[in-house]
Image (cartoon, rainbow, N blue to C red):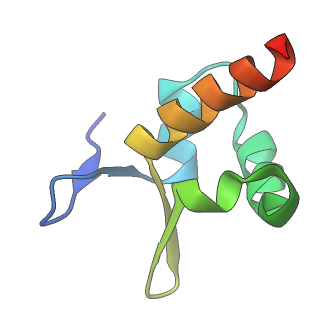
Amino acid sequence: MQTHSNVSGKRLATFRQTAQLYPAFTESALRWLRFNGNTNGFNKCVRKIGRRCFLDLDELDTWIDQQKDQEAT
């Protein structure tokens, strides 16, 4: 599977591609996280280009690590 990268070198993927790369997340779960992004901080992972939404995989990795840190405290 190929992810897209923009000029700045960020790794971008669609919700479907991300669900395939991260089997713990279904496509529906990723969309739910985006819908509730204002409360859970997931919005920083989303990049909108035109009408299409992509996930920044580097930001997603950071977000996952932050969730783990929040559970520990």
Q: Is residue 42 left or right of residue 57?
A: right
Q: Is residue 8 left or right of residue 34?
A: left
16 in relation to 26, above or below:
below
Q: Is residue 51 left or right of residue 2?
A: right
Residue 69 is situated, as x and y percent measured from the top left of the image, at 71, 20
57 in relation to 5, above or below:
above
Is the C terminus in the top left, top right, bottom left or bottom right quadrant?
Answer: top right
Q: Residue at x 47, y 41 (%)?
A: 17
Q: Residue at x 48, y 54 (%)?
A: 14
Residue 42 is situated, as x and y percent measured from the top left of the image, at 69, 52
Is the N terminus in the top left, top right, bottom left or bottom right quadrant?
Answer: top left
Residue 8 is situated, as x and y percent measured from the top left of the image, at 15, 62
Residue 41 is situated, as x and y percent measured from the top left of the image, at 73, 53
Q: Residue furthest bottom?
A: 50
6 in relation to 31, above or below:
below
Toward which corner of the image does residue 36 lie, by quadrant?
Answer: bottom right
Residue nearest the viewer, comparing 51 with 35: 35
